[in-house]
Image: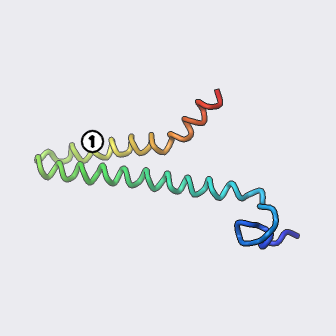
Amino acid sequence: MVSLFSDPSLGGKGKPHQNSPKKKSVWSHVYGGTQLALSVLLGLYVGYRLDKRWNLSPWMTLLGAALGFGLGLYNFLRPYLANDRSEE
């Protein structure tokens, strides 16, 4: 039986479990998803403010959301695209 205290990442002195690297990848996905959501929200906000300033509602809001989504998706997928290029 393997004890939780044998995992060095949990304060133990044993070898790390096989699942330890997965914890890092899960948090990198959480970070990427949060970054994607924030870029969409930032694009929405900037588009909304431009709509109010230039009275072009709803076009700048839609454009800002689309740009935020596109740039956020690119930023989210960039590590995977880099891995594909490095494997070739």
The residue where tag 1 is placed is 63
Q: Amino acid at mark 1?
A: Leu
Taking the image as shown, residue 18 lies to the left or right of residue 31, namely right
Look at 33% across and 41% down and name the residue there: 67
When the figure is inspected, residue 6 is found, relative to residue 58, above or below; the finding is: below
When the figure is inspected, residue 18 is found, relative to residue 67, above or below; the finding is: below
**Where is residue 13 drawn, in percent x and y?**
79, 69
**Where is residue 76 drawn, in percent x and y?**
48, 45
Q: How is the image coloured?
A: rainbow
When the figure is inspected, residue 46 is found, relative to residue 70, above or below; the finding is: below
Q: Quadrant of the C terminus?
A: top right
Taking the image as shown, residue 74 lies to the left or right of residue 45, namely right
Figure quadrant of residue 60: top left
Q: Nearer the viewer, residue 62 or 25?
A: 25
**Where is residue 87 drawn, in percent x and y?**
65, 31
The crowding category of the residue bearing disc 1, from other C-alpha atoms within 10 Å (few below 14, some 14 to 19, many at least 20), is some
Look at 38% across and 45% down and name the residue there: 69
**Where is residue 58 drawn, in percent x and y?**
20, 47
Figure quadrant of residue 2: bottom right
Residue furthest toward the top?
A: 88
Taking the image as shown, residue 31 lies to the left or right of residue 49, namely right
* Residue 23 appears in the picture as rendered: yes
When the figure is inspected, residue 80 is found, relative to residue 1, above or below; the finding is: above
